[in-house]
Amino acid sequence: MNTCPFLGLTHDPKTPALFPTDRNCCYQVIPLRTVANRHQEKYCLSGAHQNCPIFLNPEDPLSREVLYSQGHRQQSRRMVLLMLAALALLALAFAAWAYRDALINARFTGLPPVSTEWVSTPTLGLLSAAVTPTVAGFAATALPSPPPTHTPLPPLETSSVTPLPGLGTPIGSDPAFVIHRVTAGESLTILSRRYGTTEAAIRAINLMLPVPLWENWLVVVPYQFEDVAGLPLFEVYQVTADDLSVAALAQQLNVDTALMARYNHLAEDDIFANGQWVLVAHMRR
């Protein structure tokens, strides 16, 4: 089947499930998101994926309406469980009402009480086993006992962290680089596709690079170019002082001042901002 190259499982970006499931994720967007089943049927699992709005423009906010975060998916499951619990309570209430009505009729007509054998009072466990659907990869389980009162679900957390200068944005020009902080599930393949380079180029210019990538590791990525021949090795440094010049930091780190100025797209007497991320170049031996 001609599936989208950016479709993969949550634990394996190179292997998608060949049917719509909430375990399939879109690796075209960062951070990782699951894809609506209807969108998978229409685009991801067919040759039509080349017309997918996310495939064509991953930054388009309208196209991201078919993507769901991990928290959204778990919240949807909780809502389904609460709805099933409510249905179980309604069934119990209806059975109790029917039995009470039968006893009242028998009392006024002189007939013997109706046998209770026809009223099969279901338990929550049995009801859940009968109506809970089985999703691929997840076994149906008994519903938990419903809470005595409705407890509203907590709101999803949103990030309010503002990236510091130089983190996640291109630095310099011809060549340009990006300092990327690794998030869970990312790989060199994902970074190379996102920034228009190759895995080999990323490996070649980083002084230290754990593979597979560690979460929160800072990686220097070539931005929209692949030929890294002749470039130095890079590592990342964060400035933690005020009024620190390019020349002073180069002397402090014992590296070439001209290289530090060139690859950070600054002059040697320019001043770094406190908290700024800096490319530190090391000449190859």
Image (cartoon, rainbow, N blue to C red):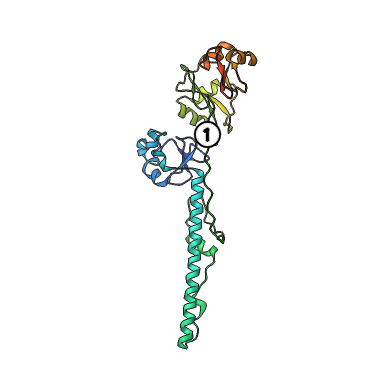
As drawn, 209 above or below 120: above
Give the residue at mark 1.
186
* Image position, residue 225 (x, y; %): 45, 21
The image quadrant that residue 7 belongs to is top left
Q: Residue shown at 50%/65% (left/top)?
A: 89
Q: Residue shown at 54%/55% (left/top)?
A: 151
The image quadrant that residue 57 belongs to is top left
* Image position, residue 269 (x, y; %): 56, 12
Label 1 neighbourhood size at 10 Å, few (<14), some (14-19), many (20+)?
A: some
As drawn, 79 above or below 53: below
* Image position, residue 28 (x, y; %): 44, 34
Q: In which quarter of the image is the C terminus?
A: top right
Looking at the image, which residue sits at the far front? 243
Q: Quadrant of the N terminus?
A: top left
- On the picture, is 157 further left or further right than 55? right
- On the picture, is 249 further left or further right than 81? right
Q: Residue shown at 53%/58% (left/top)?
A: 150
Nearer the observer, 118 or 107: 107
As drawn, 141 above or below 170: below
* Image position, residue 163 (x, y; %): 53, 29
Nearer the observer, 50 or 69: 69
Which amino acid is tagged 1? Answer: Glu
In this view of the protein, can residue 283 be seen by the observer? no
